[in-house]
Amino acid sequence: SFQNFGRNFPVFPDGLVEFMAVPQSPFVITRGKDNTVRWLNLPQGNSLYLRGHDDSVTVFAHSQEGRWLITGAADGTVRAWNLNPLSPSSEPSLYRASTPRSIVITPDNRWFAASLPDGSMRFLPIEEGCVSNREPFRFPPANGHEAASLFSSADGRWLLERGPQDQNASLWSLREKKPARLFQLEVGNANIESIFANQAGTWLAGQMKQDT
């Protein structure tokens, strides 16, 4: 269990897998190997259980201002959670598909994106602070048939999609009402950590970590 200044937090039967701090708040989101996400209030020493999946939660991401949490699970569902401190709640299931391996909410809070195990992509707009429950934009795999890692630029206008074995990455434009996969960039064997774009959108730079 978590311990904070003498306070005990929930026990994870199969161990803690991942935790992350919620921006601009005293909260921490955690997941184990079960179907429940734990929402911890560190100063008060209490916790809430966010239940909405029928199988283990495999991945999550939060919006930059901390209002929205997106979770994906092995049951093939992706859910949006409104982290209103007074009444956290789950929105309707965003969609049911293969388990997403990589999900992201763009820093400008305009898009939710997911890469699925077959290599296909899903995008949902975030409108007036709410994740849309309409049908997502669906795109076929770029190269292989494996889930990719996703990297958003700080302004949310660009997204890089990189498969686990690929030496190329797909560049997406998220500036319009519909995402567009533009072209492939050669990235070699380096591990991408983040990407940066200038305001005019005339150049893109990546921060890489080379395996040694």
Image (spheres, rainbow, N blue to C red):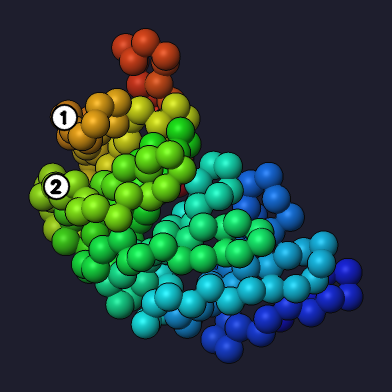
* Amino acid under disc 2: Phe
Label 1 neighbour load within 10 Å: few <14, some 14-19, many 20+? few
Rendered residue at 31%/37% (across/down): 160
Q: Position of residue 20 (x, y in %)?
A: 60, 58
Q: Amino acid at mark 1?
A: Phe
Label 2 to label 1, Cα distance in Å?
14 Å
Which residue bears the numbered disc 1?
A: 183
Q: Residue tagged by mark 2?
A: 139
**Element type where label 2 sits in the image:** strand
**Disc on the earlier residue, 2 or 1:** 2
Q: Is residue 106 left or right of residue 65?
A: left
Q: Nearer the viewer, residue 152 or 204?
A: 152
> Is 173 above or below relative to 68?
above
Instruction: Tell me if residue 113 can be seen.
Output: no
Q: Residue at x 84, y 76 (%)?
A: 7
On the rendered structure, is 175 left or right of 120? Answer: right
Residue 205, how many percent across, how many down?
39, 23
